[in-house]
Every structure is written in C-alpha cells, then in structure tokens.
Image: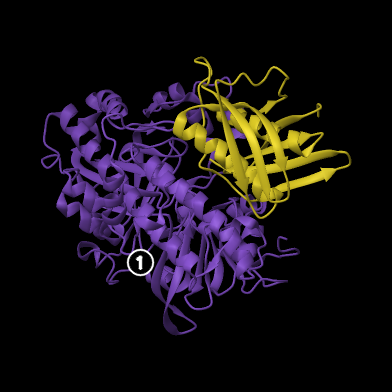
Chain colours: A purple, B yellow
Amino acid sequence: MAVEGYRLERIDEYRWRVPRTGPMLTEGLVFADDELILHIRGDKSLQQVANVACLPGIQGPSIAMPDIHWGYGFPIGGVAAFDLEEGVISPGGVGYDINCGVRLLRSDITAQQLQPRLAKLMDRLYRNVPSGVGASRSDLKLSPKEVARVLVSGAAWAVKNGYGWPQDLERIEAGGTIEGADPDNISQRAVERGRAQVGTLGSGNHFIEIGYVGEVYDETAAAALGLFKGLVTAFIHSGSRGLGYQVCDDYLKTMLRASEKYGIVLQDRQLCSAPLQSDEARHYLAAMRGAANYAFCNRQMMGHWVRETFEEVLGQSADRLGLRLVYDVAHNIAKIETHTVNGREKKVCVHRKGATRAFPPGHPEVPEVYREVGQPIFIPGDMGRYSYVLVGTEGAYKETFGSTCHGAGRMMSRKQAKRTAKGRAIVRELEDVGILIRAASRATVDEEISEAYKDVKDVVHVVHKAGIGKMVAQLKPLGVLKG
Amino acid sequence: MADAEWRTIEHTADLGLEVEAPSLEQLFVVGAHGLAGVLLGDEAGVPSASAGRATEWRELVLEGPDRQALLVDWLRELLYIQITEGVLFTAAEISELGEDRLIARAGFAPPAADTPVERELKGVTYHDLELSQRGDRWYARIVFDL
C-alpha cells in the first residue's frame, strides 16, 4: 500500500519538505518554485517520493528535482541513497533505460556557417544513425562474445574498434567504463536484444540535436568546456536500448521474489528491491553496470557517426571542425559513491532516476580538464525551445548526493500531447521558426511537442538558485533528429 | 464498457492500460490484445471473435508469485516475442490459469503493411498494477514504460 496522508510544507523559496509520516523512514525533499510545485502537486510524483522514503536503509532525504514527474515506482527526477550494510538496491530506481544519458559535442563552426548545409546535414544524420521503433543496424550485428566485450569495456570498446577518439574517454562519466560489470549476470535474451542495436538512437524522447550556443552565463566555465557564443553543438540523448530494458525486466522479476524473501515491505511493487549485501543485489549491480557500459558505447558510436556526418557534409575533418566531446553523463543509474551523511564520510548506493550527477570543482572523479570548474551537466529542453549546460557544485554534493535535474519534465501525457497536436503540422511549425525536424514517426513528433514539457528554463532556474547546479550556457536548436 | 474491452489511460510519462472482461482467462486474452493495440498506436479496442488469425502458435508456460505478477509476465513475454521476432499477438487459448501458473497457446502474426508497429514499449511495470474482481466482471490496470 502506498503511503497515505503525506503532506507538503515549504522550507524556503526553492525547497519543500514531505514530513515523515506512517512507514516513511525519512522525509522527502523537493526542489521547486511556486509555479513548478503546482505541476508537481498535479500528479502522483509526491506520493512516489513518500513511497521511496520507506525503503530500508535510505540515507538523507528522498529527493525530488524540479523536473520531477510521475514515473513508475520511483518518480522520474528522483534521487535516493542507501547504506551499503542496511540498505537496498532497486531496479525500479534506475529504470528500464539503464544509463540513459546525454553527450554533448562542440565545434569551431558558427551557426551561420552551418546554415546553408543544415538541411543536408539533418538528412544525412537521419540516414547515418538508425532511429525509430526497434531501430537496429543491418550492417553491424555483434556476436554474443563481442556484446560481452561491450558490456565489460563500454565506450573503450568503441574507441578500440575505431569509433571515436581515445581522448573522448577522459570526458565521459566513469571514463566510459564502469568497473564491476559481469556479462554472466546478463541473460541471453538481453544479449540477443543488444546484438544489432549498439549505435542506434531508438524512439520516444531520444534525439540528436544540432544546435548552437545562444547565451553564455559563466564565461570561465564555458571557455573551459569549449563553449563560445554562436558556435555549433551536437547533443545525443539515448541509452542502453533493448539490452538495458531486458536487464531491468529480468531483475524486476528477481527482486520481486527477493523482496518477499528478505521481508521488504513495498509501497509499490515496482520498488521491489534486495539488500545491497545479498546475491540478488550483487548480480543486479554487475548486470546494470554492463548495461550502463553498453549505453556509453552506444553514445560513443553515435558520436562517431555525428562526426562523420559533419565531415561528409562540410568536407572537412572532424578534428579541423573542432568537433570535440565536451562530456557524456548518465541520468538513469545506481552508483556506489562516497558522500557525507550526518557529518560522516561513507559509501552509499545512489540511485538517480531522471537525475544527473553534479560533482563539484575539485572532485577526483571530475576530469582533470574540468577540475577547476566542476563536472559538466546537460539539461535538454523540448525540441522547440532551448537546453542548458551547467556545472556541478559543492551545494549539490552536500545536499543531493551530488545530483541535479535532468530535463524539462513532462507535463502532458502522450495522449494529451497528441490531442494538442491534432490538426497541426508540428514539423512545419518548427521549420517556420528555423528548427528542422527529421523523424522516423509523426506520432513521436506529436507526442514530443514543446507544450508537453515544462519550460526547462524554469527547472534550471530552480537548481541554479538552490545551488545544486550552476548555469553556464544556453543552447538553441537548429535541427532535431527524433526516433 | 462492452463485454470485454481495453483502453489506454493517461499517465504523465508513460502509458496505462485498463482491461475489463467477464472472466479471468478472457481478461488475460483481452489484455494481450490491448498490448498489441498499444504497440500499433491505438487507444481502445473491443476484440471481436474474428480477431485471431494467427500465422504461428506458441506454447507458453509461465510461473510467478501470484496472478498479478503472472499478468505482467504474460504481457512481458508477448512483448519480447514482438520485439525480437516482429510478430504481434492475435489470439490465445488459455488451458491453465492458477494462482502461480499460466499455460497458454498464443497465436501471432506479422502486423499488416498499412498498420506498422508505432510504439516502442520499454517494459511492462508493476507500478499501479491492479487485478481484481468487480461484481461478476474482472478488471485490470497495467502501466507500461514508454
């Protein structure tokens, strides 16, 4: 049964508390302003924050970012950390799309220089990166043995096989390879689903967006990231595809049994979990890390094809175009990290479901090149407006287990979005404002209309003002490839 | 609602399915039609007696802790077959449906050329799951991750 009778009380301008009640082991902490809290109150996400607060061994509060919305089990935009001895791990706290995340490339060419070739670039991208429902590559089907290598090595597998540059690896969370992955804990079904999907975008809210730096808010940080006003960028948003979904599916079943076995009381069966010290948890962690590595590899390969497409259309090498990787960061993952809890440093298992790691300047896991400014964070908005680049802060490290928001957050159901888009030519509407759309399905475009999302500006404003992320730049879209 | 039918329900990020049928067995079958309908981008359906021209049949034996989990497993299995083999559920004959075991013969066919699969479902979740008897009818609610 879900937690009943939970309340919401204001802490300050950007923070709200869900006080402990009933079976909650800790309170909820929600980041939002007056406007966003109205949306948040409109769905069941606060209920989900309260439900997560009931899981054994939770450390600090059950946290919700300003882009929080109703998910399944955990809210989307939720962060929860668990004690390694007393706590649990939950596949529902990571989600189906394990290591769904965002990668950003920057360039030395201006939006104006690209404009005459933009349509061609978008057409070629559509051809070069498989997208859409069940997208797979006809030209690249890995053997199960090779998939196992991807699961262990992640983005490093891609680089070793000629997809991208060796220096890309130092600009990926965890270097693009999370240690501790074990293919033996991944089912044959999952491996099978992964064989022809590495290097594919997928559908839904996944995209490749060609844009440019519209505004710079922090010159020093932007310069460190290689972002300068007017220069072209490329965003890639995707995850671990069918392999990751299958891993989640397989382990939900395992965890449902485990919850009963270990006497874990569930407020929602999708929160099914196992103690971190159990075999079930160890196996899931090893499998989830493998799927996360697959996702790093997936984005690395797409990044390579984005570079190749620029080369093909602009007739210059990616190196000469300055198409460097800024960073690649996960927003659906569970990681063992060291944080300070009740004044004591300890290792905890941080679940980020629709939340981005936001480590501060000086943290050893921030690439050396960004050590002075903090870890880069990417917050994509909807396809018609803008996206943001931020850096991690000490505030995030202290208050949210080094986490911040991950996107605009849906406001409309897909059904509602389709109703809103009915009778309108969304692709044409966007073209009229200078944004070219290439999409495998019209339905996806309709479901992803701008109005379906909160204004990402409002979300980013909250995390910036609350000190759990620092605004660096705003990116504006020129062309979007949707699944 | 008609004798047996399914319809999608609103969910901010994902998509839900409501199913009603006169018996538990029919509920599972109509739920499977609902899954196929959702994949095709439909929003509601009343499976007719003619629904079910299968080109291939599969014997499925599923075990789970209870009927709710079995319903999720059943839909997961059909989804897996659709994803990996490109065929959609069209019909089923359920020979056993107990508290913890389901045995069924499920029929599949490729989608028609003019109605391709439009959606990618990531999974069938346990979230907000309901399976209950309401008077003399059975009701289920299932949430998919999109």
Task: Say if residue A76 shows up in the picture.
Answer: no
Q: Is residue A285 left or right of residue B5?
A: left
| Residue tagged 1 | A359
- Camera-side residue of A317 and A303: A303
Tell me if A373 is positioned left or right of B85 in this view: left
- The residue at 51%/57% (across/down) is A91
Task: State the residue at coordinates (56%, 26%).
Answer: B108
Q: Secondary structure at mark 1?
A: loop
Give A159 or A211, whichever is nearer the viewer: A159
Number of other residues with Cα within 10 Å of mark 1, as a class: few under 14, some 14 to 19, many 20 or more: many
Q: Quadrant of the C terminus of chain A?
A: top left
Q: Looking at numbered disc 1 in the image, what kind of residue is underneath it? A: Phe
Could you tell me which residue is drawn at 25 percent across and 45 percent down?
A105
The quadrant in which the N terminus of chain A is found is bottom right
Q: Residue at x 55, y 55 (%)?
A: A252
The spot of residue A202 in percent (x, y) is 41, 36
Residue lying furthest right in this view? B135
A361 is higher (above) or lower (below) than B85? below
Work out whether residue A76 or residue A10 is closer to the camera in this orientation and state it: A76
- Chain designation of label 1: A
The answer to whether residue A53 is above or below residue A451 is below
The quarter holding residue A173 reads: bottom left
Dividing the picture into quadrants, the one containing residue A111 is top left
Q: Residue furthest top?
A: B114
Image position, residue A388 (x, y; %): 38, 49
In the rendered image, is residue A137 in sight? yes
Where residue B96 sits: x, y (%)? 71, 40
Residue that protrudes farthest toward the bottom in the picture: A344
